[in-house]
């Protein structure tokens, strides 16, 4: 289970590129950095939107692991063979009651029509346009150069956690956002 996740990276990237702020991701320039209409991006709802984006990806991870076979025997087998499965279950169970409970159906894995921060669904055209722009940037997100020894040690620590899930995104300064009691989003400075 990786500390890098496209959903969280996309959410922070879109916030930064739009020039909008949502605490604690409020240290970047307030100037939009691309010519895409981001009126739908409501900074007040951004944290919940980011949480929902990550939930969708975590539900996908869950479905890949359990393949609709979550019974006690299979779950215990998965926990014995991979202790990080417990972290995934803790995180999913820590989401507010308004979120679906496991096991999940395929409807939580469909990106097309997934709500934007204002609650309206993205159109397929918006989705392709935004992800197309993000794809240009994604290379440095998922293959960051880590030359700072303290940063490297933090990343190794995040990766080794068995209780909490830590997600890392590039940002201009170190920040930390608790999305749920078991899910923490870290903005880190990469060289």
Image (cartoon, rainbow, N blue to C red):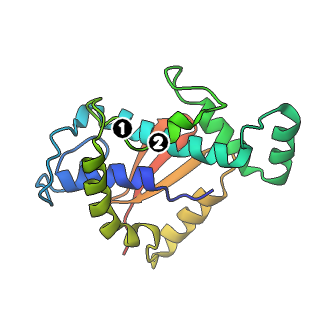
**What is the secondary structure assignment of the residue under circle 1?**
loop
Are discs 1 and 2 less than 8 Å apart at CB?
Answer: yes
Q: Where is residue 124 in the image (x, y as percent from the top left)?
A: 30, 46
Q: Tell me the CA gap for discs 1 and 2.
A: 7 Å
The quadrant the N terminus occupies is bottom right
Query: Residue tagged by mark 2?
Result: 110
> In this orientation, does residue 163 appear?
no
Query: Is the residue 83 above or below the residue 118 in the image?
Result: below
Answer with left or right where residue 113 lies relative to residue 29.
Answer: right
Of the 4 image quadrants, the one containing the C terminus is bottom left
Image mark for residue 94: none
Neighbourhood count class around disc 1 (C-alpha, 10 Å): few under 14, some 14–19, many 20 upward:
few
Q: Helix or strand or loop: what does disc 2 sit on?
A: loop
- What residue did someone put label 1 on? 113
Can you give x and y, in whole percent of width and height, for residue 46 in the image? 30, 37
Residue at the top extreme of this rendering: 97
| Quadrant in which residue 52 is drawn | top left
Tell me if 89 is positioned left or right of 128 in this view.
Answer: right
Give the number of marks: 2
Residue 117 percent across, percent down from the top left: 29, 35
**Which residue is pictured at 61% across the width and 48% down the height?**
61
């Amino acid at each position: 289970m990786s500390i890098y996740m496209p959903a969280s990276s996309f959410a922070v990237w879109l916030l930064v590129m739009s020039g909008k702020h949502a605490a604690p991701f409020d240290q970047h320039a307030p100037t939009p950095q691309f010519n895409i209409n981001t009126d739908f991006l409501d900074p007040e709802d951004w944290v919940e939107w980011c949480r929902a984006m990550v939930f969708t990806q975590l539900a996908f991870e869950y479905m890949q692991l359990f393949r609709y076979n979550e019974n006690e025997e299979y779950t215990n087998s998965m926990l014995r063979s991979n202790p990080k499965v417990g972290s995934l279950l803790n995180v999913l169970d820590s989401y507010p009651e308004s979120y679906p409970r496991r096991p999940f159906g395929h409807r939580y894995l469909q990106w097309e029509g997934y709500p934007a921060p204002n609650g309206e669904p993205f159109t397929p055209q918006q989705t392709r346009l935004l992800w197309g722009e993000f794809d240009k940037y994604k290379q440095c997100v998922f293959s960051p150069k880590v030359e700072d020894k303290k940063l490297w040690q933090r990343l190794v620590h995040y990766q080794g956690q068995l209780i909490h899930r830590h997600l890392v995104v590039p940002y201009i300064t170190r920040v930390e956002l608790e999305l749920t009691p078991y899910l923490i989003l870290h903005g880190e400075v990469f060289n």
